Image (cartoon, rainbow, N blue to C red):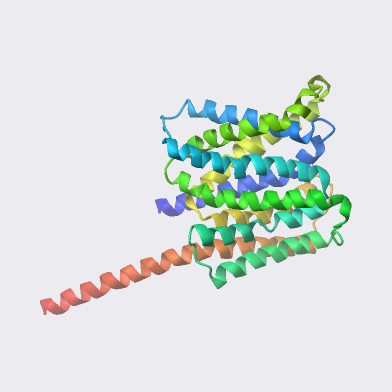
């Protein structure tokens, strides 16, 4: 029961993280480049988040990291913090929401492939069906707004977004090894510290030219959301889920971001709920359930096999007594 409850919390944490990311797309887009330039936001985001994780770690039991694993965390930070944050914000500022949504939706597929190669996860028909089901739901939602514009003006932004998507998928697979050894906050504080060492130089030029006093209150609120919720809390929730679930399941929750963003827009009066949105939501969440259920069914098969084995031993014991 305890293990089942823990997995339930892991799923809820992933859902919460993707709700935040669904909101973050619009909020981050709104603050760039009027309030802050993309590279400056990357540096500011990394510095603030690294500080938050290190402050949080002060209130926890010491969890020293062995030297060789620091090098491994440095590699993780390159894929999960440096490439992910830099190319996400840069790509977001250069391409359209429809293009980004499509490219973002390929994340579970890449995670599925990486997990199969690196973690030796089983490639099953049921799991593949779940991924396809969710992907179809995302495409239906996106294509109702018209054919995506793959014009040359957005091509570079599309490429940045695609590389970011692949990098994040790879990160969710390789970071799992560290989560088996260390507390999530310990993993995150080192990951963001190493990411900071790269992101500060990358954003220094734009950072130095920023007029910070000119940023409006709404601008600071948007930046604060990106830092506190979409980065600090978002990464922590993802890591919590990743510690207890497979990278394939974690990445499949990415499918929920477009539908969450659409429903939020409807709630705010910027859009309206229609049959297409309802159908997309059903397909997306069905896909997530199917991929998640695969892991549960494997566990049930093992448990059933053990119960049968115990039953056979009990039966033999009764026969011997006779």
Q: Residue furthest left?
A: 321
Q: Residue furthest top?
A: 213
Q: Give the residue displayed 58% in from the left and 61% down from the top.
A: 112
Is residue 226 at all visible to an observer of this figure? yes
- The residue nearer to you, when weighing 41 against 184, is 41
Left or right: residue 12 versus residue 209 is: left
Q: How many marks?
A: 0
Residue 244 drawn above or below residue 322: above
Residue 20 drawn above or below residue 272: above
- The residue nearer to you, when weighing 139 against 308, is 139
Name the image quarter holding the C terminus.
Answer: bottom left
Q: In the image, residue 133 lies at what x, y percent?
A: 66, 67
Q: Quadrant of residue 113?
A: bottom right
Q: Give the residue displayed 79% in from the left and 40% down from the top.
A: 29
- The residue nearer to you, when weighing 247 against 203, is 203
Is residue 24 at all visible to an observer of this figure? no
Q: In the image, residue 240 lies at what x, y percent?
A: 52, 44
Left or right: residue 275 versus residue 196 is: right
Q: In the image, residue 168 lies at what x, y percent?
A: 63, 49
Q: Quadrant of residue 142?
A: bottom right
Q: Quadrant of residue 287?
A: bottom right
Name the image quarter holding the N terminus.
Answer: bottom left
Q: In the image, residue 5 lies at what x, y percent?
A: 46, 51
Q: Give the residue displayed 56% in from the left and 50% down from the top.
A: 172
């Amino acid at each position: 029961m305890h293990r089942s409850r823990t997995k339930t919390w892991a799923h809820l944490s992933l859902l919460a993280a993707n709700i935040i990311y669904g909101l973050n797309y619009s909020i981050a887009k709104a603050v760039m480049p009027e309030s802050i330039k993309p590279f400056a936001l990357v540096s500011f985001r990394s510095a603030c988040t690294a500080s938050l994780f290190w402050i949080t770690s002060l209130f926890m039991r010491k969890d020293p990291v062995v030297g060789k694993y620091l090098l491994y965390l440095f590699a993780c930070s390159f894929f999960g913090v440096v490439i992910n944050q830099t190319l996400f914000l840069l790509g977001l500022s250069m391409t359209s929401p429809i293009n980004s949504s499509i490219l973002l939706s390929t994340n579970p597929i890449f995670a599925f492939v990486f997990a199969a190669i690196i973690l030796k996860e089983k490639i099953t028909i049921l799991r593949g069906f779940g991924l396809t089901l969710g992907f179809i739901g995302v495409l239906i939602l996106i294509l109702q707004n018209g054919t995506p514009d793959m014009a040359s003006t957005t091509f570079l932004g599309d490429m940045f977004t695609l590389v970011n998507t692949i990098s994040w998928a790879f990160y969710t697979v390789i970071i799992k090894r560290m989560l088996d050894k260390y507390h999530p906050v310990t993993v995150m504080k080192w990951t963001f510290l190493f990411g900071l060492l790269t992101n500060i130089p990358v954003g220094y030029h734009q950072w130095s030219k920023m007029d910070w006093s000119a940023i409006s209150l709404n601008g600071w609120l948007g930046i604060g959301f990106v830092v506190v919720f979409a980065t600090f809390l978002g990464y922590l929730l993802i890591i919590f889920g990743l510690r207890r679930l497979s990278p394939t399941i974690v990445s499949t929750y990415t499918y929920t971001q477009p539908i969450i963003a659409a429903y939020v827009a409807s709630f705010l009066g910027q859009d309206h709920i229609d049959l297409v949105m309802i159908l997309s939501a059903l397909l997306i969440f069905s896909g997530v359930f199917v991929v998640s259920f695969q892991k549960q069914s494997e566990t049930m098969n093992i448990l059933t096999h053990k119960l049968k084995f115990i039953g056979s031993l009990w039966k033999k014991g009764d026969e011997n007594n006779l």
